[in-house]
Image (cartoon, helix red, strand yellow):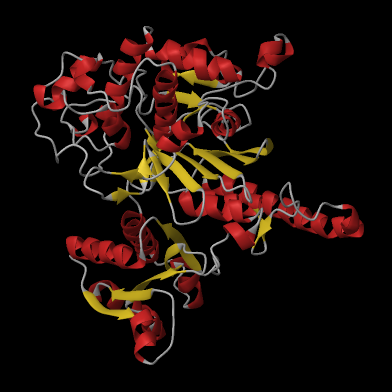
Amino acid sequence: MRKKLLTLASMLISGAMLAQNGGTIMKKYEDQLPQAGRGNVHVAYQGKSIDQMIYEFMEEQGIPGMTLAIVQAPYIPRVVGYGVTDLKKGNLAAAKTLWPIGPISQGFTAVAIMQLLEKGKLYLNDSIGKYLKDIPDNWKGITILQLLQHSSGIADYRDQKGFDVSADYQPIQLIKTVAHIPLAFEPGTDVKQSATNFLLLTSIIEKAGKMPYHDFVKKYQIDYLGLQQTYFGEDIVKVKQEDVTTTHNVHETFKKDKAYINPSETTTGYIENDSKLVTAPSISPTSLKGFSDIWASAENVSHWDIALAGGVLIAQPENRNMIYKPTTLANGKVVPAMAGWQFYNHKGLMDIKGNAPGHSAFLSRFTDASELVCVTLLANKEGVELTNLARKIAAAFDSSKMGTGANDSQLYTFESQFSVNETMSHIEHTLKTMGIPIFAKFNHGKNAEEVGLKLLPNQVIVFGSPKVGTKLMQENPSISIELPLKISVWEDKNGSVWAAFPQMNMMAAEYNLDGEPVIGKMQELLKTIVVKAASVY
C-alpha cells in the first residue's frame, strides 16, 4: 500500500511540475488573461501544485483514496480523484465516487428545517414538545432553534454503551438510551454537539412536513437540484456496481451496459489499527439519521454548496443568515458554530467536517464576495484532520486573501475560531488535562506595549516531556535548541487568529532523525492540542 502511494505520488509530482510549467507557458499570453474576477488560473501555493500537496498529505496520513472538488462560484472547475476506494478491488477514486459525508449531512437537515419555516409549517422558537410526545418532560421546553444550535444539553446517543453504528434502530430506541441522562447544561446557555439533536429534528420535519424525512429532503433538495450522486444510506442498494472480485479486478460490464460507463461506486472505509489499515464497520442507514446519513460525490456536495450561496434552497436572506452565522445564546454568550458549521474571524469563512465510520469529510466555504471559493475533501480513512490541507488548497486560488501568511512547509498552521487569549487559555487547559508540563509562557504583545511599541496579540507557550526530549537529545544533542516544544498563537492584520507549531518531520530531517517514531507521535500530539483549542466541535 505504502509503495503504491509513493509511486502514485512520484507520478503526480511530475504532473505537478508540468502544471506549474504550464503557468509559465501561459505568460506568453498574459495580456489576454483576465487579471481579476473569476479566480486564479495559476493554482499553486508556496511552490506546490494542488496535486502535489494532496499526494504528500495522503502519504503522510496513510490515506488510500480521496476526492477533491473546488468551487469558484458558480463553477465547479476542479473535481479530482486520488488513490483507490477499496484496497482489495483496486477501484479508483473518481468524480462520481460515493462517500459517506459524515456530519456534513447536518446541513441537509438544517436546510429542511428552514424550508419548513418558509412554508409556515413551524417556527424556530417552537418548543419541541409541540411536535414530539414520546420524549422526557425536561426536553419538551427545548426549542427547535436550540436543537439546531446544539445548545439543548441533551446527551449524545453515540456515546452510550452498546451503541452499534452497524445496527438498525428506530428513533425511539436511540432516544431511550439517553432519556435518563440529566441535561449537560440549561438549554440555550452553552453548545455541545450531539447527534441526538439532529435525530429529534428529523422527527420534527416528519411531523411538520407530513412525509418521511428521507422523502422531504429528497424532494426539496436532492431531486430539486438534480443531484444524481447523492443518496441516503438506505438507497445505496439501488446504485449499480460491478463486482470486480469475480473478474480478477478487471471491469467488464461497461462493455455491454452503458450504466457502468464512469460508474458511481461506493467506498470501503478504513481505520488504523497497530499501524495497519483495517476495514471499518459498515454504516446502518438508521443509526445516524439526520446527523451522518448521506452518501454523495464530492462534486454533488459542491453543487449543493453552491445552492446554499443564494436563494435556491432557502429563499429569504434572513433565514439563510440564521443558520450560517455564529450562535448567540440567551445569556449573551457568542459561540462561533451553528448546525454543525463552524465560523472564523476570516470574513465569510465557515466549514463543516467530521468522521463517518472509516471516512473523513470536510467542506469549507469562503463566502465573501471577493473570494467565493469552496473546498470539499472526502477520504476513506477515519480520523483525518483535513482543515489545514483544505486551507492550502483554497490559498492556491488566491494566497493573498486565503493563505495563512506563514511558511506552511515549515509550520503547521490552523485558524482559530477564538481570540488569542481564549485560544491560548484552551491550549493551557488541554496541556494540564493531559499532564504535560508547561515551562513558560510569553506574551509578546504585552512585552511590546511595555517598551512603547505596538504589536497585535501574539503569545507563545513552551511545554514538553523531559523523558521524550531527552531520548531525542541522546540521538542528536544539537536538537536541544529546538526543545522544549512550542505553540505560537497570533492575530494577523486581517483579524484572523492562528495557532502554529513547527512541522516535526521537517525538524527531524534537519537533525537526521527522520526514522525516529516519536517524531510522528509528537506531530499528532501537537495537532490534537491545536485543533482542540481552536475549535468549538
Please state, as top left, top right, bottom left or bottom right, where the C terminus lies in the image.
top left
Residue at the spot 63% in from the left edge and 40% down from the top edge: 71
Which residue is nearer to you in this view: 319 or 417? 319
Image location (x, y in percent) of residue 157: 21, 29
Image location (x, y in percent) of residue 44: 68, 57
**Left or right, residue 491 beside residue 424:** right
**Left or right, residue 23 beside residue 487:** right
**Left or right, residue 184 beside residue 292:** left
User: On screen, 164 above or below 331?
Assistant: above
Residue at the spot 86% in from the left edge and 60% down from the top edge: 27
Q: Quadrant location of residue 205?
A: top left
Do we see residue 161 in this rendering?
yes
User: On screen, 432 above or below 167?
Assistant: below
Which residue is nearer to you in this view: 454 or 94? 454
Image location (x, y in percent) of residue 453: 43, 88
Which residue is situated farthest in the top direction here?
Answer: 210
Q: Quadrant location of residue 396?
A: bottom right
Image location (x, y in percent) of residue 102: 41, 32
User: On screen, 145 above or below 344?
Assistant: above
